[in-house]
Image: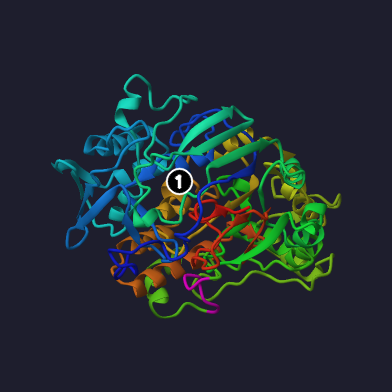
């Protein structure tokens, strides 16, 4: 994205892969929910995550030890214009789909056009900037852009390439369990919808000898078992039905991971650090709802959320709080008033910025006691300023007599304890809360159509924020369904900072624009942040090994199971 890639053209492996890793063995993951489709690129149906990871490939691949650098995968060479106004890829002559057919320029163009027209919205968002796609040689394809966006060549390089001929007699937008044909290292094996799916390593995989792939794709079989909720998924791991379990709760890691298999050494506990942003995890206000449209109301409920007490109850106080969307990284906003480039970038929007964006904002803190009196007093004051007052019956109402009540939508019982503690605090303000726990399918439907008052959500953010920020926080998502702007951010400043992120031609400007966006989002009070994990906690079968040279992203995409191997 900026500067030169770290690895030389003739690199023998990615820096965090073990090129001497043996091939063989298996891994089984436990997943919540189910699946009824093998097409992960459309709105209809639910497809296993493993299809896009193991079956399909892209023109280029990431090195997860760099913020954002790509290297040739299906493409043997890449060329761009001086200002990245176009990009040209030349396909490797040996690239093949799993049925032996070559990967062609026609497959590439058809894939990108079809994904834009019939795929999920994120593909259309960036494709709208492609003015022309054309074949420029037997194995070469060029994409010319309608506007300058330095990230676009990289985004195009990360588009999945599908086999055009395998879709000739089928509607791409229809959900089905037809077996997918990709060019990746695995093919779909045995499966039963909503129960399990296996991926078998393809011994004839065309990319076995690529330097990029040395030490990757070592396991012969990858299996995903589906369970109805998180507690059953954990019990399945304890019983030995699955091979690995990622624990997000620091307290459970200490208290519950002492079962016999660990004592016998059959299961190992690994703690893996990382240097990526905290992202945002917490209770999301849907500002499309009139009840949450006023920032003062949102500020009041953030004060009412007694993080220090809840963190002690749930995590014994071990988990750090996400101070902002990009905290734990150089991209996060700095304490105090905005300065330098950040201040200059935000100054034109001073009149529309939420309080604290320019002069400094930090999450409220409590003394850790359950009653949280000081913050509840501030919350009541903010609610009163927004027109909400408690009557003689102890119920909070506005000047029209409407009661302050709302629903918290939860996908599983995993966050029920946190929501109950929050609800108890809100009762002291005269607020009535309903907790609704629904299954994954209903939750996805309501979430994607913004049919909720408040819900729990997670945004995982990277060291290379780009076009996906429009999908997450762009104002178009206020009305367009299917985005991840669940809170309904409608901010000219946020839109402008995202544009700066995409058009910056230096890392300094890019970092300043991201820090400015972080300020707008955090001071906008769209989410009640909880904790994040600055390490990953993985319990896994002792036979499963991973390299000790970890990428800067740690346990994230491209790590498990890509660089792991099986050793008796």
Query: What residue sits 66% from the left and 47% below the top?
Result: 243
Q: Nearer the viewer, residue 189 or 429?
A: 189
Q: Residue furthest right?
A: 393
Where, by quadrant of the figure, is residue 390 drawn? Answer: bottom right
- Whole-percent x, y for residue 211 in the image: 35, 57
Is 213 located above or below residue 236 in the figure?
Answer: below
Is 73 located above or below residue 378 in the figure?
Answer: above
Q: Residue furthest top?
A: 169
Circle 1 packing at 10 Å, graded few (<14), some (14-19), many (20+), is many
- Whole-percent x, y for residue 113 in the image: 29, 36
Q: Is residue 415 left or right of residue 476?
A: right
Is 45 located above or below residue 560 in the figure?
Answer: above
Assess whether residue 331 is covered by the magenta stretch: yes
- Whole-percent x, y for residue 167 in the image: 35, 25
Q: Is residue 376 left or right of residue 81?
A: right
Main SS class of the magenta portion in the image? loop
Q: Is residue 508 left or right of residue 485?
A: left
Q: Nearer the viewer, residue 68 or 85?
A: 68
Q: Is residue 492 visible?
A: yes
Q: Which residue is mark 1?
A: 477
Mark 1 element type? helix
- Whole-percent x, y for residue 159 in the image: 35, 45
Q: Nearer the viewer, residue 168 or 492?
A: 168
Q: Is residue 332 left or right of residue 231?
A: left
Q: Is residue 479 visible?
A: no
Q: Which residues are magenta?
A: 329-336
Quadrant of the frame with the N terminus? bottom left
Assess whether residue 162 is covered by the magenta stretch: no
Query: What residue sits 57% from the left and 33% below the top?
Result: 197
Query: What residue sits 70% from the left and 59% below the top?
Result: 268
């Amino acid at each position: 994205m900026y500067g030169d890639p770290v690895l030389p053209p003739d690199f023998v492996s990615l820096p965090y892969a073990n090129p001497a890793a043996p091939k063989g063995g298996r891994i089984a993951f436990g997943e919540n929910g189910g699946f009824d489709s093998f097409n992960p690129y459309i709105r209809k149906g639910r497809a296993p995550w493993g299809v896009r990871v193991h079956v399909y490939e892209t023109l280029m691949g990431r090195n997860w030890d760099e913020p954002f650098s790509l290297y040739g995968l299906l493409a043997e060479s890449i060329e761009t214009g001086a200002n990245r106004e176009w990009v040209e890829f030349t396909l490797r002559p040996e690239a093949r789909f799993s049925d032996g057919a070559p990967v062609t320029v026609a497959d590439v163009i058809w894939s990108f056009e079809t994904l834009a027209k019939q795929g999920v919205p994120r593909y259309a968002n960036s494709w709208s900037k492609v003015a022309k796609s054309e074949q420029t040689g037997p194995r070469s394809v060029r994409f010319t852009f309608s506007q300058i966006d330095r990230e676009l060549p990289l985004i195009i390089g990360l588009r999945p390439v599908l086999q055009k001929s395998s879709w000739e007699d089928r509607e791409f937008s229809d959900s089905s369990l037809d077996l997918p044909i990709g060019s990746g290292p695995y093919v779909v094996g045995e499966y039963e919808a909503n129960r399990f799916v296996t991926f078998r390593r393809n011994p004839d995989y065309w990319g076995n000898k690529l330097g990029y792939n040395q030490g990757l794709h070592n396991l012969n079989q990858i299996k995903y078992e589906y369970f109805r909720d998180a507690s059953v998924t954990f019990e399945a791991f304890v019983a030995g039905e699955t091979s690995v379990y990622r624990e997000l709760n620091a307290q459970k890691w200490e208290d519950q991971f002492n079962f016999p298999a660990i004592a016998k050494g059959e299961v190992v506990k690994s703690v893996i650090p990382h240097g990526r942003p905290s992202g945002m995890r917490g209770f999301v206000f849907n500002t499309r709802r009139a009840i949450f449209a006023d920032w003062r109301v949102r500020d009041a409920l953030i004060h009412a959320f007694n993080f220090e007490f809840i963190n002690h109850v749930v995590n014994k106080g071990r988990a750090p709080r996400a101070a902002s969307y990009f905290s734990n990284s150089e991209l996060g906003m700095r304490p105090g008033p905005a300065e330098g480039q950040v201040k200059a970038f935000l100054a034109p929007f001073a009149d529309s910025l939420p309080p604290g964006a320019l002069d400094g904002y930090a999450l409220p803190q409590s003394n850790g006691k359950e009653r949280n009196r000081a913050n509840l007093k501030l919350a009541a004051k903010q609610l009163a300023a927004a027109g909400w007052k408690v009557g003689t019956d102890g119920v909070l109402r506005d000047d029209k007599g409407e009661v302050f009540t709302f629903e918290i939508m939860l996908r599983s019982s995993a966050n029920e304890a946190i929501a109950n503690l929050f609800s108890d605090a809100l009762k002291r303000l005269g607020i009535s809360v309903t907790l609704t726990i629904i299954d994954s399918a209903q939750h996805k439907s309501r979430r994607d159509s913004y049919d909720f008052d408040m819900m729990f959500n997670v945004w995982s953010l990277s060291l290379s924020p780009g076009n996906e920020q429009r999908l997450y926080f762009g104002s178009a998502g206020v009305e367009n369904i299917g985005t991840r702007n669940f809170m309904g951010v409608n901010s000219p400043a946020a839109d402008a900072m995202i544009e700066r992120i995409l058009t910056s031609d230096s890392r300094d400007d890019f970092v300043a624009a991201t820090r400015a966006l972080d300020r707008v989002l955090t001071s906008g009070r769209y989410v009640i942040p909880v904790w994040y994990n600055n390490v990953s906690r993985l319990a896994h079968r002792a036979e499963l090994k991973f390299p000790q040279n970890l990428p800067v992203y740690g346990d994230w995409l491209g790590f498990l199971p890509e660089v792991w191997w099986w050793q008796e």
